[in-house]
Amino acid sequence: MADDTSRSDATADKGRPTRKQGEKTVERNPFKKLGRFLREVVEQLRKVVYPTRRQLITYSIVVLVFVGIMMAYIGGLDLLFGDLVRRAFGADS
C-alpha cells in the first residue's frame, strides 16, 4: 500500500484540468484581445439579414398600433381609478 508521499512529480499536477488538443494559452495583450473582438464583431455583422422595406413598414405599423392600444388601455385605467379616488375622498368635480 503506497502512501501519499510516494507520488512522483508527474502525478503532482493532478486536480488541474489539462489543455485540450490545439487549445492555446490565454492571451495577455489587451490590444490583441481588442483586435480579435473587433474582427469577430465585423464577422457577425456580415451574417445579419436586414428586413426589406416592406417588412420594415409592416413591423413599424404593428408596433405603433400596439403602442396606441396600450396607451388607450392605460389611459382608460388611469381615468377610472382617478374617478374612483375622487369619489372615495369626496373631492368636488
Image (cartoon, grey):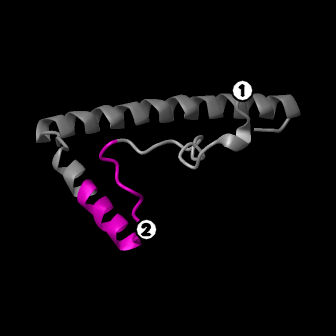
Which residue lies most toward the front here? 1
In which image quadrant can residue 76 be found?
Answer: top right
Which residue: 72% across, 43% down?
5
In which image quadrant can residue 61 be found?
Answer: top left
Query: Marks 2 and 1, Cα distance to the nearest angstrom?
Result: 45 Å
Report the magenta residues as a range.
21-40
The residue at which mark 2 appears reads as 28
The residue at which mark 1 appears reads as 1
Q: Earlier in the sequence, mark 2 or mark 1?
A: 1
- Give the SS element for disc 1: loop
- Give the SS element for disc 2: loop
Q: Residues within 10 Å of mark 1 (few under 14, many from 20)?
A: few
Is residue 21 shown left or right of residue 57?
A: right
Callout 2 amino acid: Arg
Which residue: 18% across, 44% down?
47
Is residue 75 shown left or right of residue 83?
A: left
Q: Residue 22: within the magenta?
A: yes
